[in-house]
Image (cartoon, rainbow, N blue to C red):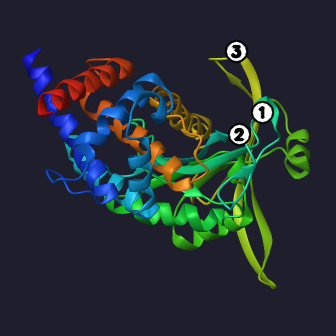
């Protein structure tokens, strides 16, 4: 227990350092810093509630977040991943598989500004803050961790943001074998941009008329590929591109005991049709990560995207520390509670 307590204490110091560096705060100074803020932040994470509900420093924390650009937050997360990645030799991993996904947070109220995406009003939700996340999902690496997350505004250029994320995480790993995307990423511009940048991709294709026509001509268990040449109209210029479309007709899924049709787009030179579906299913691990992160969700009413994004990344740091250091020993919820209780004890002694 003493050993575990010492490890928790070092982890708590890591959280202090993250908050200080992300928000440009000075530790051990007359001013408030991560040492003070983590008690309220951890309490809100444990309780899945508003910062204002569990602490007295919500206004101070909000002001600190507003003083720095969002880039300071994701670069500090990047540094944290780099340091913790040494625990499992992340930078020595060859041919890692990455997955991209959007996740969002609900907003209630008048939708204003460029960072709140409009919503349908169901359950009183009028808007969404959206974040783009890139996570490592390679089957031979036990740590399924988010490598970077960024906030995305209304009308953002998906291809540009995805490629920026890839360029940013590339130094963290030895080489990238493949990036996985769901149907929401099926875009001519994204496929063209990824190919031009030399990034291999596998994208789940929505069942549009072209896909339905191809699948209708196939028989059960049939697998085939076709070359698909397309045109992209951008900035009054026609850009030509191509991709490989892979079709799989009524493939039996042992887990669900049902048969499904599949269609993918890829720029891989060699495609193993027997493993293309299992490879794509690895993308679902990123969604599992989001569900784990929700256990540490800090609720907010703020309209400021910087505040929402900082809370989101703070939750990811907690998840990252748990996955790399404690996952085999304690549940995520117990890890959060233990860390919070130690923080309360530590801060009480200092006061």
Residue 175 image point, x, y percent? 37, 58
Badge 2 element: loop
Badge 3 element: loop
The residue under label 3 is 257
Up-down relation of residue 338 to residue 313 (above or below) = above
Up-down relation of residue 85 to residue 65 (above or below) = above
On the rendered structure, is 310 left or right of 231?
left
Residue 329 in view (yes/no)? yes
| Residue 108: image tag | 2
Mark 1 or 3: the one toward you = 1
Whichever of callouts 2 and 1 sits on the residue coming sooner in the sequence is 2
Q: At 44% across and 64% down in the image, what residue appears?
A: 69
Label 2 environment density (alpha carbons within 10 Å; few <14, some 14–19, many ≥20): some
Residue 145 in view (yes/no)? no
On the rendered structure, is 181 left or right of 23?
right
Calculate the distance from the C-alpha at mark 2 to the C-alpha at mark 3.
40 Å
The residue under label 1 is 124
Q: At 52% across and 30% down in the image, what residue appears?
A: 288
Mark 2 or 3: the one toward you = 2
Up-down relation of residue 160 to residue 279 (above or below) = below
The quarter holding residue 268 reads bottom right
Whichever of callouts 1 and 3 sits on the residue coming sooner in the sequence is 1
Badge 1 element: helix
Calculate the distance from the C-alpha at mark 2 to the C-alpha at mark 1.
6 Å
Viewport quadrant of the N terminus: top left
- The residue closer to the viewer here, 34 or 5, is 34
- The residue closer to the viewer here, 335 or 209, is 335
Q: At 38% across and 62% down in the image, what residue appears?
A: 72
């Amino acid at each position: 227990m003493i050993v575990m307590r010492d490890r928790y204490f070092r982890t708590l110091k890591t959280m202090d350092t993250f908050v200080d560096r992300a928000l440009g705060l000075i530790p051990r100074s007359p001013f408030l810093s991560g040492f003070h803020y983590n008690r309220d932040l951890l309490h809100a994470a444990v309780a899945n509630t508003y910062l204002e509900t569990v602490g007295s420093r919500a206004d101070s924390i909000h002001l600190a977040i507003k003083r720095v650009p969002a880039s300071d937050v994701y670069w500090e997360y990047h540094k944290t991943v780099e340091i913790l990645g040494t625990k499992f030799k992340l930078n020595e991993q060859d041919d890692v598989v990455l997955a991209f996904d959007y996740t969002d947070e609900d907003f209630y109220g008048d939708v204003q500004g460029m960072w709140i995406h409009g919503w349908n009003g169901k359950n009183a939700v009028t808007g969404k803050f959206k974040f783009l996340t890139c996570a490592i999902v390679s089957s031979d690496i036990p740590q399924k961790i988010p490598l970077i997350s960024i906030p995305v505004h209304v009308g953002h250029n998906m291809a540009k943001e995805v490629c920026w994320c890839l360029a940013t995480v590339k130094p963290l790993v030895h080489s990238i074998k493949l990036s996985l995307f769901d149907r929401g990423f099926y875009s001519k511009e994204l496929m063209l941009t990824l190919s031009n940048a030399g990034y291999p991709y596998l994208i789940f294709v929505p069942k549009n008329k072209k896909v339905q026509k191809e699948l209708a001509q196939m028989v059960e268990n049939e697998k085939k590929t076709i070359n698909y040449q397309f045109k992209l109209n951008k900035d009054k210029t026609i850009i030509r591109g191509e991709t490989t479309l892979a079709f799989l007709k009524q493939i039996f899924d042992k887990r669900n005991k049902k048969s499904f049709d599949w269609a993918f787009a890829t720029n891989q030179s060699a495609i193993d049709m027997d493993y293309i579906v299992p490879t794509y299913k690895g993308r679902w691990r990123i969604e599992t990560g989001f569900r784990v992160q929700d256990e540490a969700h800090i609720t907010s009413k703020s309209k400021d995207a910087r505040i929402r994004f900082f809370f989101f990344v703070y939750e990811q740091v907690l998840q990252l520390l748990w996955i790399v250091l404690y996952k085999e020993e304690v549940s995520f919820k117990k890890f959060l509670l233990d860390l919070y209780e130690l923080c309360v004890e530590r801060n009480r002694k200092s006061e």
